[in-house]
Image (cartoon, helix red, strand yellow):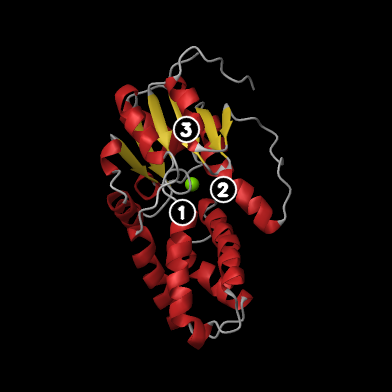
Amino acid sequence: MKKYSVILWDLDGTLWDLHGNTQIALKQLFEKYKSSNFEASTWEEFTSNYEIFNERVWALYREGKIAKEELRTKRFSDLFDSVHAHYTPEFVSQFADEFLFICPRLSAMLPGAIDVLQAAQKDYINVMVTNGFIEVQGIKMESANIRSFFQHVVYSEEAGVRKPHRAIFDLALQKANATPDEAVMIGDDWEADILGARNAGIDQVFFEATEKRLDELTGRKGGRHNYSPTFTIASLIELNQILFEHGTERESN
Ligand SMILES: [Mg+2]
């Protein structure tokens, strides 16, 4: 088995429980404003619509089609339209501010995340590579107390490009002083993490939980990928075999 020396980690939906923490923050705000703004909606509709619109705006942001400020508010104005909410532009902005205050301060991690980060300290250089906003991602890492696990953190806002752009992976390798074949990227986003790493010549571990949930939510068909990642996992526990058990044969592509 090829032994890697560097792990490139995605944060949201890979280590930090984006879905769980988002639901907690969103529920607080839904309850707060339910009687004044959202009386036409149920919580179930509100949260599942949010996830769909949020995913859409992040895809647009990744492709450089919308700016950060628009991403911040558009996911909520789209959501509010879809649930026939009463709102003004000022309310959208205030809601977005409150959400971005509450959510990153929540600290739920995905099952197995802390254990695998701890175990990876011994054998690997760990690099965080994230498309999230600098000010937000920093708070998340502090809240979850995981910043010290990473020798380097590469923010797309600092790199000037976002995953899946090759330059951000090149920068991460440069910081770790590694070649592409010494590294493996672990992430939950097919385009940003998996195709991005592949284009940079880096092996990939596709954590498919987020995509499975979105497939279910949107009724879209799974299995639409025409490329097999180096590894696919359904839970972080499976990383043990990939990262720490020597002599295991790698899956062939
Ligand atoms: Mg992610």
Q: Secondary structure at mark 3?
A: strand
Q: Which residue is mark 2?
A: 210
Q: Give the mark toward the camera: 3 or 2.
A: 2
Q: Position of residue 152 (x, y in %)?
A: 30, 36
Q: Give the mark toward the camera: 3 or 1.
A: 1
- Write the residue at 71% across / 44% down: 222
Q: Secondary structure at mark 1?
A: helix
The CA distance from mark 3 to mark 2 is: 16 Å
Q: Secondary structure at mark 2?
A: helix
Is ligand 1 closer than 8 angstroms to the Cβ of mark 2? yes
Q: Quadrant of residue 208?
A: top right
Q: Is residue 143 above or below residue 240?
A: below
Q: Amino acid at mark 3?
A: Met
- Write the residue at 70% across / 34% down: 226
The CA distance from mark 2 to mark 1 is: 9 Å
Q: Position of residue 79 (x, y in %)?
A: 57, 71
Q: Position of residue 181 (x, y in %)?
A: 46, 20
Q: Which residue is mark 1?
A: 18
Q: Which mark is residue 185?
A: 3
Near mark 2 (Cα within 10 A), the count class, few <14, some 14-19 or many ≥20, is: some
